[in-house]
Image: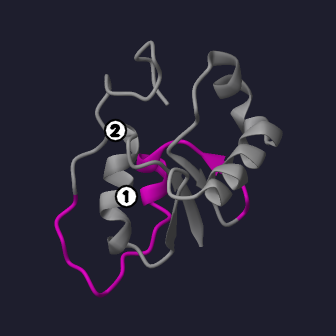
Amino acid sequence: MIIAYVMQSCPDCTLVKNEAAKYSNLQIVDIGEHVRNLKQFLLLRDTNPAFSNIRKSGKVGIPCFVLEDESISFSYDDVKELLTISSATNEPSSPTLTDGESCSIDGTGC
């Protein structure tokens, strides 16, 4: 199972959240839905070296994907190759993430 940490108000997370139903091995954890989810993500973000540059640049680090081998990816396009399409849906693929929209105050990304 691949875990995707997202947040409703994050424009970069919208695509991931909208496409989640297409995949049988993608679990969405919205860090804004409950403080428990936020704490879980913050523990990961504050202790995992994959977030080093993200912390230094003041970004949040979402969407964040924890792969089955526990490695971290921040690229939905890279993770899509690892996802298993559910047989219950045959929706056309959505557009990829767009640059320019972000969660950071300075507009540089989540």
In the image, is residue 76 part of the stretch drawn in magenta?
A: yes
Residue drawn where x is 44% and y is 12% of the image = 106
SS of the residue under disc 1: helix
* Label disc, if present, on residue 17 of the rendered structure: 1
Residue drawn where x is 71% and y is 51% of the image = 39
- In magenta, the rendered stretch is 69-93
Residue 55 image-quadrant placement: top right
Crowd class of label 1 (few under 14; some 14 to 19; many from 20; radius 10 Å): many
Residue 20, position in %: x, y? Answer: 38, 66
Please, is residue 102 above or below residue 57 in the view?
A: below
Report the residue marked by disc 2: 11
Please, is residue 96 above or below residue 18 in the view?
A: above
Q: Main secondary structure of the magenta part?
A: loop
Contact between labelled residues 2 and 1, with CB atoms less than 8 Å apart: no
Q: Earlier in the sequence, mark 1 or mark 2?
A: 2
Q: Nearer the viewer, residue 28 or 90?
A: 28
Crowd class of label 2 (few under 14; some 14 to 19; many from 20; radius 10 Å): many
Query: Of the residues shown, which amino acid type is indicated by label 1?
Result: Lys
Residue at the farthest left position: 92
Please, is residue 66 above or below residue 74 in the view?
A: below
